[in-house]
Structure formats: structure tokens, C-alpha cells
């Protein structure tokens, strides 16, 4: 039973960054702006927040420090997404190119800056953020073991943000307007919605969520940051497409992906899998092969917001 | 009076690319100034000096880097022109390199004089297989080729690591063993011209590929068909162009180009071995920037590859001024960002140009 809890906790740690980044990307795409720079936004969020944690490690620690780090990661994500928003909304530039630029810029910049600041490409930090047991709730059998022991606060934040995103997208006026901008921006503009403004907000939100996702990737996985989030941003893109641009389905696909990631990283601890003698490289391939098979079956693209990737021209009505 | 340029003259595109490059360099310099104002100008000068920085050896290194850069850029540019986004160059390049290392290192009874040819052709075929999978998925299952290609990139890393670790591994190097010196590409005098560098005939092969693809795209009916589907899918469909067949063929050719590029990189010098790591081969990250700067023109690809090789060689020098080698990658990414504005740049230049020629007319 302990094994199952161990695997489930592992799974959450993989699922949280994927979920956050995929939700961020979804908001942007549903407003009509493609965002393939997720990976870069995650790296920027992770870089600046780890830099903060590292710098203040002697002064503060624990959850308080993590909360400030979270705010910093969000801010970093928002700042880098400004570039994407400006290029794709104001200048009507190619959104794919701008996204690729951000995805290429961030890892190079993170290592560049880390080397200049610390002299090394890897930034180590003191990881004091594990909550070994939530008071009271951690005592509940089974549920307490799964959700309230050995967790990181980012998991709960992701849960809250997931609910907020779903409600905002489907139950508020803002969400309806956002979705309309991604489906038929001319019609939205004709009823007085400021399409560029809605898209700006959406891209900034996506930056915020991705920045947080970057920190949520680093915290449970390691005590150092080396300028990469292991391609989670691109995986999140696949999660979003497999999740058909819908928050609830995105949650499902993020969990499915994290099962594969969990197998890839923990197979040696599972006796049955270890005895099969399959080389470790094949386990590492598994999440990616699975994605490939899944998008083959899912026939992605059918439910993509119609105006995604198209710049909005005021006179094109 | 000077001949007036027409509105869609290629000159405007070239000027727009030059503007992206200059803007990228300026922003790069600003970033460098923020981090280290004292040595930023020295380092920036080293970066621009590139191939002139260390005599003929640096110049030879510029020619050495052109080949993999141009092949990656060409693969992306070719697919872009036809409306497919081959972001899977890294994977195709990696498996190509892996196959070339295996053949070049294990010889497999292939006679010396033709071994390098067999190796790079098979490397190309490995690239074909890697490119075909996303191509088939896009054509028949209507999958997003961007996602499929990215997944193929990750799979290529672990797959190649497995093959190398199983058949041709040197644990002390955490890399493949070295290839046989008899398997290397012919140097064609490049080693004498540029002593101490890794320059080889690869640069000529890359140039040849660029010319062949140029002819294919602009001088043949098949190329016209491909560009037509890239320009307007519906019109191409209406004109009876078989889109599915073309998507598969494009990914096949693009995969071949990238695979050969990978093969050539690993057969270019004796000391180049295949590292077992979980990070993509660094040369492949320049494929997209080069295609963008070249405006997807195969000849432009070669020029853009030259420019980025120049900066890469300059980038190896900036360490002495206290800047990491990632400086070049950072600046390249800024250049890509600005190349997203190429349409705006083109419009600005055109506006300025036509306004000026109007004025000249009025004065007369």
C-alpha cells in the first residue's frame, strides 16, 4: 500500500506543472493566440524564483519563502509573455515564430545569466518546502495518505487554480467573451468587446500560469536548476491538444501523462517492472511514444478554437 | 533614373532580415551590458570578429559549422515553403548522426573509399524514417505535425542513446567510441587550406543540397505544386494537387536532408563522438532561426548558415572576456524574435522606399 501512495505522490508532482502550463496555454489559445513558448515561460519562472530562493536561503525558509518565490515566478512568467503578446497582438507577427523565439531564448538566457551570476551553469538551492503532514487532514486514512502527506503547497495551488480557471472560462461573462475572441473575433468586436485587450489579458494569464508551472516543476524534483524544465512546456502543449482545449479533459490528460512519467522515473523501484529487463531508455521514451500514439488516436485539431493563430484585423470584418 | 523596384521584389525581404539581425545584435549587446558593463564591448567585438579572430583556424571552423547549420536550416525552410512545419529536425539529425557513427565506427565490412558515402546515405534514410512518421500521421490521421515532431525529437534522443550504449559505447567518455579515421569525409584540401580546423567537404555537400533544393522548388513542376500548397491550401486542392502525397514527400525529403546533416557532422573529424546525453544536439537548434532569416529561400539558407557559424566561432572566444558561450544562443533567440516582425519591417521599408520614389517623381 505504501508503494501505491508513493507512486500517486510521484504522479502528482509530474502532473502539477503539466496541468498549470497546459491550462495557461489553453487560456491563450481560446482567446485566439497560439503559444508554443510555454517551455520558455516555465524556464523564466523557474529561473527567477530559484534565484530568489537561493539568495534568501540564509534569511528565510519554508512555506513563507515559497509563497514569495511563487509570486516571483508568476511575475517572471508575465514579463516574458509581454513580448509574446506585443508581437502577436500589436504587431500581428507570426505567433509560432515568436513562441519559438521565447522557447529558445529562455534556456540560453537562464544558463547565460546563471554563469555570470554564480559562475556555474547550475544553481543549487536549499529545498525546505516539503510538507510532511498537513495537521488533522493528514490523519485521515487513505485520503490523508494520498493528498495530505509529503506534499508541496504548489499541488494545492494548482488544484485551486484549476477550479478557478474552469469556473471563469465557462461560468463568467469574462470567460464567455474570452472564448468568443478565439472563435469569431470580428463578431466579438461588433458587440463591443475589445478583442486586443482580451487577448492581452489571456496571454498574460498564460504567462503567469506557466511561470508558476516552472517553479512547480523544479521544487519537487530537485535541489538545483540547470536552465531546463526537461521539455515540460512542449509536453504541456501535447496535454492541451489531447485535452481538446477543455480544462476538465486537460486535467485528465495531464494525469494520464504523469502516469507514464511516473513509470519512466520509478520503474526500478517496482520489482515487477525491474525484472522484465527492459532497458531504461525505453522507459524514458514511454511518455513520448504514448503521446504520439494518443494524438494519433485522438485526431487532434477538430476542436481547436477557430481563430487560434490568426491576428485580429479591425478592418477585416 | 534608377530602375524602380516592384512591390514584391526580394530586396525588401533581404533588408527585413538584415534589420532583424541588427536589432537582435543591438538587444544582445544591451543584455551583455546589463550583466557586465566593463567587458561587454570587448566581448561583443570578439563575437563580431568571428572567423577573423584566430587566423585561418577560425575561418576553417566557420566552414565546419556551415554544413550542419545549413542542412538543418534547409530542412526547415523546405518544409516551411510547402506549408508543413518540420520542427523535428533535431530528431532526424540525431538518428542520422547515430547511424553514421555506427557505420563509421564499426565499418561492417564496407570498403574504405565508399564507406563515408554509405554512412551518410544511410544516415539520410534514418532521417527519412524519423520524418515519415509525423508526415504519415499528419496526412492520414490529421495530427498536428508540430506535436508529433517534438515527440519524435525526444524519442530520437533515448533511442539513439540506447543503440549507442548497446553497440558502440565507451563508458569512460560517456559517449560513443571514436569513428575510424578511414570513415571520415574527404577533406578536399580544406585541412591544408585551414590547418587545425575541422573543415571538410561537408560544406560543399551542403551547398550542393541547397542548390538542388532551390532548383527543385523553383524550376520544377513538382516544386511549384509544393509551393502552391504552402501558399494556399484550398486553391491547391481545387487545382487537383494531391495534398496527402505531398505532405509525406515533403517530410521524407526534409528528413533526408536533416539525416545527412547529422551524418556529416559526426564524420567531419576524428574527435567528434556521439555524446550520450538527454539534451538535443546543439547544432540543431539553429535550424529554425536560419530558415526564418533566409525567408525559406535555399540559397538564403546557406548565407544565413554562414552568418550564424560566424557568430558561433566568435562566441567561442567571448569566454576570455568573461562571458559564457551561451551568449550566442541568447542573441540568436533575440534575432528569431525580431524575425517574427519581418512582415512589419518589410512594410516599413516599402513605405519609406515608395514614398521617396514618389517624391522624386514629383520633383521632376
Image (cartoon, rainbow, N blue to C red):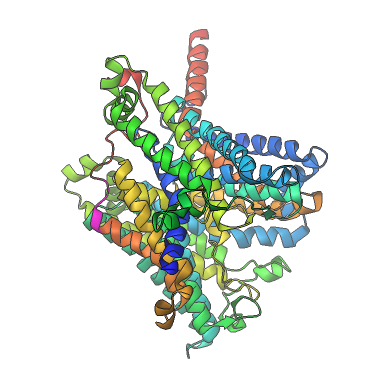
Q: Is residue B175 left or right of residue A307?
A: right
Question: What residue do we see at 63% from left, 40% from top?
Answer: A64
For the C terminus of chain A, the quadrant is: top left
Residue farthest top in this picture: B363
Can you give x and y, in whole percent of width and height, for residue B280 in the image? 53, 61
Tell me, yes or no, if residue B75 can be seen here. Answer: no
Q: Is residue A129 left or right of residue B317?
A: left
Magenta stretch: give its range. Answer: A297-301
Can you give x and y, in whole percent of width and height, for residue B49 in the image? 73, 48
Can you give x and y, in whole percent of width and height, for residue A146 in the image? 42, 57
Q: Nearer the viewer, residue A291 or B190?
A: A291
Check residue A299 for magenta coloring.
yes
Residue farthest bottom in this picture: B109
Residue B130 found in image quarter? bottom left
Question: What residue do we see at 44% from left, 61% from top?
Answer: B153
Q: How many marks?
A: 0
Q: Nearer the viewer, residue A224 or B200?
A: A224
Tell me, yes or no, if residue B51 can be seen here. Answer: yes
Check residue B6 for magenta coloring.
no
Q: Nearer the viewer, residue B237 or B60?
A: B237
Residue B234 found in image quarter? top left
Secondary structure predominantly adopted by residues drawn in magenta: loop
Q: From the viewer's perspective, is residue A155 above or below residue B200?
A: above
Q: From the viewer's perspective, is residue B271 above or below residue B236?
A: below
Q: From the viewer's perspective, is residue B164 above or below residue A214?
A: below
Can you give x and y, in whole percent of width and height, for residue A108 in the image? 61, 49
For the N terminus of chain A, the quadrant is: bottom left
Residue B67 found in image quarter? bottom right
Residue farthest right in this picture: B38
Amino acid at each position: 500500500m505504501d508503494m501505491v501512495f508513493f507512486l500517486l505522490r510521484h504522479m502528482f508532482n509530474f502532473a502539477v506543472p503539466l496541468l498549470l502550463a497546459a491550462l495557461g496555454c489553453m487560456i491563450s489559445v481560446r482567446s485566439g493566440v497560439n503559444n508554443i513558448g510555454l517551455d520558455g515561460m516555465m524556464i523564466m519562472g523557474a529561473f527567477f524564483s530559484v534565484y530568489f530562493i537561493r539568495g534568501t536561503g540564509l534569511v528565510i525558509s519554508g512555506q513563507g519563502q515559497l509563497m514569495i518565490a511563487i509570486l516571483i515566478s508568476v511575475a517572471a512568467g508575465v514579463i516574458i509573455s509581454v513580448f509574446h503578446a506585443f508581437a502577436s497582438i500589436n504587431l500581428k507577427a507570426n505567433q509560432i515564430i515568436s513562441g519559438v523565439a521565447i522557447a529558445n531564448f529562455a534556456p540560453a538566457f537562464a544558463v547565460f545569466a546563471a554563469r555570470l551570476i554564480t559562475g556555474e551553469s547550475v544553481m543549487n538551492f536549499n529545498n525546505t518546502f516539503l510538507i510532511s503532514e498537513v495537521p488533522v487532514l493528514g490523519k485521515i486514512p487513505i485520503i490523508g495518505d494520498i493528498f495530505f502527506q509529503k506534499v508541496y503547497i504548489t499541488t494545492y495551488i494548482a488544484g485551486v487554480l484549476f477550479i478557478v480557471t474552469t469556473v471563469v472560462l465557462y461560468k463568467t461573462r469574462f470567460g464567455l467573451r474570452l472564448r468568443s475572441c478565439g472563435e469569431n473575433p470580428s463578431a466579438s468586436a461588433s458587440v463591443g468587446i475589445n478583442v486586443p485587450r482580451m487577448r492581452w489579458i489571456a496571454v498574460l494569464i498564460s504567462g503567469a500560469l506557466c511561470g508558476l508551472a516552472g517553479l512547480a516543476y523544479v521544487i519537487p524534483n530537485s535541489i538545483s536548476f540547470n536552465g531546463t524544465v526537461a521539455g515540460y512546456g512542449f509536453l504541456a502543449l501535447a496535454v492541451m491538444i489531447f485535452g481538446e482545449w477543455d480544462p476538465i479533459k486537460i486535467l485528465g490528460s495531464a494525469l494520464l501523462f504523469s502516469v507514464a512519467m511516473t513509470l519512466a522515473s520509478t520503474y526500478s523501484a517496482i520489482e515487477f517492472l525491474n525484472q522484465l529487463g527492459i532497458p531504461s531508455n525505453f522507459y524514458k521514451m514511454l511518455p513520448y511514444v504514448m503521446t504520439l500514439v494518443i494524438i494519433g488516436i485522438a485526431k487532434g485539431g477538430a476542436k481547436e478554437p477557430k481563430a487560434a493563430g490568426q491576428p485580429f484585423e479591425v478592418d477585416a470584418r | 533614373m534608377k530602375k524602380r523596384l516592384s512591390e514584391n521584389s526580394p530586396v525588401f525581404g533581404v533588408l527585413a532580415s538584415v534589420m532583424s539581425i541588427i536589432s537582435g545584435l543591438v538587444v544582445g549587446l544591451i543584455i551583455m551590458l546589463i550583466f557586465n558593463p566593463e567587458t561587454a564591448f570587448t566581448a561583443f567585438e570578439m563575437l563580431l570578429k568571428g572567423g577573423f579572430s584566430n587566423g585561418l583556424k577560425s575561418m576553417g571552423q566557420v566552414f565546419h559549422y556551415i554544413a550542419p547549420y545549413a542542412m538543418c536550416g534547409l530542412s526547415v525552410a523546405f518544409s516551411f515553403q510547402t506549408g508543413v512545419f518540420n520542427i523535428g529536425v533535431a530528431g532526424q539529425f540525431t538518428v542520422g548522426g547515430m547511424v553514421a557513427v555506427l557505420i563509421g565506427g564499426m565499418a561492417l565490412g564496407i570498403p574504405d573509399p565508399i564507406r563515408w558515402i554509405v554512412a551518410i546515405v544511410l544516415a539520410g534514410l534514418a532521417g527519412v524514417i524519423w520524418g515519415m512518421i509525423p508526415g504519415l500521421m499528419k496526412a492520414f490521421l490529421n495530427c498536428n505535425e508540430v506535436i508529433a515532431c517534438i515527440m519524435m525529437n525526444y524519442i530520437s534522443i533515448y533511442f539513439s542513446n540506447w543503440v549507442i550504449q548497446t553497440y558502440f559505447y565507451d563508458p569512460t567518455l560517456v559517449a560513443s567510441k571514436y569513428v575510424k579515421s578511414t570513415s571520415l569525409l574527404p577533406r578536399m584540401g580544406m585541412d591544408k587550406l585551414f590547418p587545425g580546423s575541422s573543415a571538410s567537404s561537408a560544406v560543399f555537400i551542403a551547398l550542393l543540397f541547397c542548390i538542388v533544393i532551390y532548383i527543385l522548388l523553383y524550376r520544377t513542376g513538382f516544386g511549384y505544386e509544393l509551393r502552391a500548397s504552402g501558399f494556399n491550401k484550398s486553391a491547391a486542392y481545387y487545382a487537383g494537387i494531391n495534398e496527402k502525397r505531398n505532405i509525406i514527400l515533403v517530410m521524407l525529403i526534409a528528413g533526408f536532408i536533416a539525416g545527412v546533416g547529422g551524418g556529416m557532422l559526426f564524420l567531419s573529424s576524428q574527435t567528434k563522438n556521439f555524446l550520450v546525453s538527454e539534451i538535443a544536439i546543439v547544432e540543431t537548434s539553429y535550424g529554425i532561426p536560419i530558415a526564418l532569416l533566409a525567408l525559406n529561400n535555399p540559397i538564403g539558407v546557406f548565407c544565413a548558415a554562414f552568418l550564424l557559424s560566424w557568430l558561433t566561432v566568435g562566441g567561442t572566444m567571448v569566454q576570455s572576456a568573461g562571458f559564457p558561450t551561451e551568449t550566442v544562443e541568447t542573441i540568436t533567440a533575440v534575432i528569431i524574435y525580431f524575425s517574427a516582425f519581418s512582415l512589419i519591417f518589410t512594410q516599413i521599408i516599402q513605405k519609406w522606399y515608395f514614398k521617396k520614389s514618389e517624391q522624386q517623381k514629383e520633383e521632376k
